[in-house]
Amino acid sequence: MTLDHSARITAEAGDGSLNRAATLLVSIAVAIVACSDMSTSTLLPPNAGVWLEVACAFGLGSISNVVLSMIVWREWPRSAVGAACVASLCAPYLLPFRYGIAASAVALLNFIGVWKASDVLAGTAPAALSRSGRVAFAVHFASPVEYVVEQSVASASSGLWRTELSSLLQVYAALALTASAHAALSPPADPAPAALREAVRLYCEVWTIYLFLRLFTGAFGTMLACGGFVPRTMWRAPLLASTSAADFWGRRWNLLIHGLFRRTVFRPLTERGVPGWGAGAIAFALSGAFHEYAFALQQPAQRASFGRCLAFFLAQAPAVSAEKRLRRLLGVPPPFDRSSAACTLAWTLLLMPFAPLFLHPLKTSGTFATILELVPRLAVAVP
């Protein structure tokens, strides 16, 4: 078994309580609903129209990235590569999608493809990628989930696709549970539980985004495994096991973007003498700009949402730098030095107040509501 495969299994085991966490959210929601006068609920099926458009968006984004990969593979002039990258980034704004989630999906995929092209041209991509062959090179661009390029395709375990598919189904079930909890918390409440309701609802929304991203990347990971590739781990239980800001962003959340930005932004800047905190701030700023670009699609009032994602990510940079400095100067105070659960709780309480900045453009564009339509869920009605 490969080291990366072992790490992947460990990460999935660490996230094995995912369904239990989603069930806990549902239980809390049901308890809150029981305190009010709600009496009816309906099971809503997934929206087939949303699924069809999202699938088309993923297909278009992957095809666009494959075309870009062939331009890079054939070593076209950099001016031609640059023109192809600009066209790829503009395409999502020209496609006639009905749902904002589909347009944002294409934007996310195309941005990742463009950044991978920059990674290759800058010489920061894994050295084995250029020796992997044309098909494997195209797969690297087509999938937002990276595979272990140091290994041959034949090295993938024959049962890996079953592991990936099982994880994908668990994530889908957890997303359905979380969507039901969010629906139960959405109607107006009595004054007494209102604060608790809003806090749990916000936590549900953070879980919803995480689970959707897990579903999205898990689908690509499953396809990679079916093709004989070993997908790299992208998530290491960020909402259940993170002990600090640095742990969350550096070792657990969206390790694809972390790896790309570390190779192409952070490491080159520090090698040129930029201090670590400055390079980290630039990487967070670029991440914020990336999300501004992807979430600007289908905004009814662009001015109301502009800058919120950027502000969210800019706020993370000083948090990471301050935490590292305080740890060096003061160490880890009790009870955090003895309890990882206390660390996770503290980090969650620090992260949640910033979450509305990230969620705002997703809500105003209708993307968040559309994510909920991907799964069967309960809808609670007020009598």
Image (tube, rainbow, N blue to C red):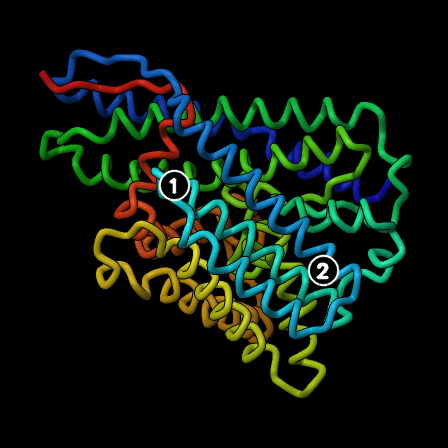
- Label 1: how many Cα within 10 Å (few below 14, some 14–19, many 20+): some
Q: Which mark is residue 71?
A: 2
Q: Secondary structure at mark 2?
A: helix
Give the amino acid type for the residue marked by disc 2 in the picture.
Answer: Ile
Q: Which residue is farthest bottom? A: 273
| Quarter of the picture holding the N terminus | top right
Q: Above or below — where is 302 with respect to 135?
A: below
Quick one: label 2 or label 1, which is nearer the N terminus? 2
Query: At which x and y percent is residue 33?
Result: 21, 22
Compared across the picture, whether 81 is left or right of 29 comes to right
- Label 2: how many Cα within 10 Å (few below 14, some 14–19, many 20+): some
Q: Secondary structure at mark 1?
A: loop
Name the residue carrying label 1: 97
Give the amino acid type for the residue marked by disc 1 in the picture.
Answer: Phe
Compared across the picture, whether 135 is left or right of 68 comes to right
Name which residue lies at 72% across and 44% down: 232
Name which residue lies at 29% across and 37% down: 201
Name which residue lies at 44% across and 66% down: 289
Can I make out residue 192 in this image?
yes
Compared across the picture, whether 22 is left or right of 225 comes to left
Which image quadrant for residue 278? bottom right
Query: At which x and y percent is residue 197?
Result: 23, 35
Name which residue lies at 55% across and 42% down: 60
Q: Which mark is residue 284?
A: none
Q: Above or below — where is 172 with respect to 284?
A: above
Q: CA distance from mark 2 to mark 1?
A: 27 Å
Compared across the picture, whether 302 is left or right of 77 comes to left
Query: At which x and y percent is residue 135?
Result: 81, 45
Between residues 318 and 46, which one lies in front from this camera angle?
Answer: 46
| Quarter of the picture holding the C terminus | top left
Query: At which x and y percent is residue 179?
Result: 36, 28
Q: Above or below — where is 322 with respect to 12?
A: below
